Image (spheres, rainbow, N blue to C red):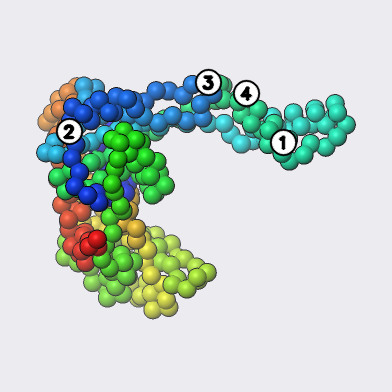
Amino acid sequence: MKTPFLKNVCIYRLSRDFKLDPETLEKQMAEFAFSPCGSQDMSRRGWVNVTPEKLFIEHEDSFLLCCQHQVKIIPNPVINDAVAERVAKIEADQGRKIRRIERLTIKDEVLHTLLPRAFSKNTSNYVWVDVAHQLVFVEATSARVAEDLLGLLRKTLGSLPVVPLTMETPIELTITEWLKKSAMPAGYAAGSEAVLKAILENGGALRVSKQDLLSDEITTHIDAGKLATTLALDWQKRITFRLADDMTIKAIHYADDLRDQNDDIEREDIHSRMVADFILFKAEFGALLASLIDVLGGEYAR
């Protein structure tokens, strides 16, 4: 079982009052349980147990679910070689050139032939539904991946009224001002990574790594018309992360003393450790999020 300390998070606000009943949720998730790809399936997605004993973890109106995604891997060169071989044979046998639409049909036939022998890649992602605070957290590095997971949750529950968590003031304006004034909010320190993008279209972007973000060099880029769209931050020396202008939080790293806090629980007791770690994670991450919303100027009032 993987740790419930999420490393990449997309955050959504429930747009109307929302409740979850544990017994109903268990039945709904069972209907969309994960099953491996069949011989002709390119991918499959479904729910798997969060712990050996439980399909999900519940604590104080917070629910931790886990989605597994299996996808067949067929390298493009393998497909292209097989298509080229078939095309060459048909052209030689029939003495004519294969048209583009025929080539696409051949490619589909090749895929169906190769699928049963393809390797499978499995990934798992957590979804944390925080009913108490009317928020949904999706373990994903992009909105596209998060939407796929939300789609499964929406089908499972029947409906899921969510919108991306949005700040009143655009995040890029706020974090750019921090860098411009070389003044971070209380409890925060600037990391050493950032992305600066020009305001004007086609103005380019600058990715900064292992550099003092409060230096004159960064200020010069900002004065020249660039905005910070991603900024590495350290919160209270407990959590480091990269904050993006769409409120996605990536590359989250938790202090060792935080992650080791439940080491007194027997390693064999996977369920108890997972529950304890989830309780610890949601308290710590919840505190970070509340602080972030505050220093970013507050949530957009819908």
Among the two numbered marks 1 and 2 on one chain, the one whose residue lies closer to the N terminus: 2
**Eyeballing the image, is 283 above or below 155?**
below
Cα separation between marks 4 and 2: 44 Å
Cα separation between marks 1 and 4: 15 Å
Q: Mark 4 points at which residue?
A: 113
User: Which SS class for mark 3?
Assistant: loop
Kindly identify the amino acid type of the residue bearing the numbered disc 1. Arg
Give the quarter of the figure containing the C terminus: bottom left
Q: Mark 1 points at which residue?
A: 103
Q: Mark 2 points at which residue?
A: 21
**Eyeballing the image, is 212 above or below 241?**
below
Among the two numbered marks 4 and 3 on one chain, the one whose residue lies closer to the N terminus: 3
Q: Mark 3 points at which residue?
A: 39
Q: Nearer the viewer, mark 1 or mark 2?
A: 2
Among the two numbered marks 1 and 4 on one chain, the one whose residue lies closer to the N terminus: 1
Q: Which residue is drawn at 52% across and 21% down?
A: 39
Among the two numbered marks 1 and 3 on one chain, the one whose residue lies closer to the N terminus: 3
